[in-house]
Image (tube, rainbow, N blue to C red):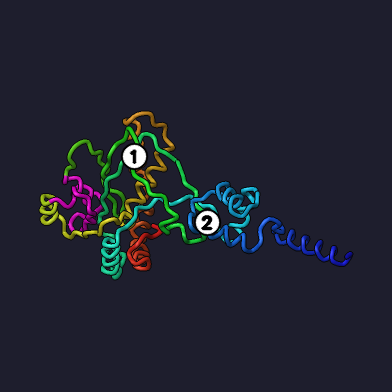
Amino acid sequence: MKQITVEVREIVVTNFQNGTTPNKKFNAYDERWIVRKLKENPKLSAPKLSNKVEKYLQKSVNPETVRRVLRKNNFHGRTARNKLFVSDKNKKRRLEFARQYLTKDFSFWKEVIFPDESKFNLFHSDSKVTVWCKPNEEFKIRNMNPTVKHGRGSVMVWGCMSATGTGNLEFIEGNMDKKNLKSSAEKLGILNCFKFYSDNDPKHTSHIVKMWQLYNCPKVINTPPQSPNLNVIENIWHELEVRIRKHTITNKNDLKKALQEEWTKIEHDFTQNLVQSMLKRLHAVECSRGYLTKY
């Protein structure tokens, strides 16, 4: 009896030295059951999961005990990514687009103008949803949180960028002026050779806009639907959002002033690195068979 007690103590000491403690609540079956329930619904919180354990396994446990089981099985709490879902039809279009332009190197992309509109709210929400998932699984559908743009008190802006920097930033009060694109191309130093990266916004696909592009844009790159991750200016909007929140903003004039000020401060190296990422983005789309990527 004395010898058995010594062996048990040695096991406990060894586990403690390895950073683990013996699990007195769950056996192997219980742990598999917990992991299975989490896979069915990754948005289950540890307290809710512990309630299920109490109900179905008849074991009263602390949520932290459940967390230890999850971490032991390589699950870690992460904020659910907000991503738009892509239809099967558009996945096919995205894949075709990626394969078409994967052969283009940086010399092609550095002459591309990436335009977009964005909405900036006076106040923004930082609400987050936590999800349990294994490494590199944060972009699976069940691990993401669908969202829509919202907010009261906002301004709409139009901007563009290329590898050489940012173009003009225009506040949209009414109809956009197509002269903005030409003046931006001149500012970026690629007026006579630029390629226009056209998304599927109805304002860009109307007949009158297409006719203007035909006579004024040396080349137009038509992108597939549901592909904001393939327009590098989306990263500019995110960076701009982060920077303006360091300002004191109480009204629309403050918001416009902050946007204009921070827009002019965006570094050339930042835009160049974004354009250089195009090949990686296209390769990621090909690897995901047209579905979501980390970009």
Q: Quadrant of the N terminus?
A: bottom right
Q: Quadrant of residue 173?
A: top left
Percent x, y of residue 39: 50, 59
Q: Which residue is mark 1?
A: 150
Percent x, y of residue 114: 27, 53
Q: Is 147 on the left-hand or right-hand side of 16?
A: left
Q: Is 102 on the left-hand or right-hand side of 217?
A: right
Question: What secondary structure is marked by label 2?
Answer: helix
Q: Residue at x 45, y 41 (%)?
A: 127
Amino acid, disc 1:
His
Tell me, for residue 38, which label it has, or none. Answer: 2
Choose mark 1 or mark 2, whichever is in front: 2
Give the Cα separation between the discs numbered 1 and 2: 31 Å
Give the residues in magenta: 178-206
Asked whether residue 152 is drawn in magenta, I would say: no
Amino acid, disc 2:
Leu
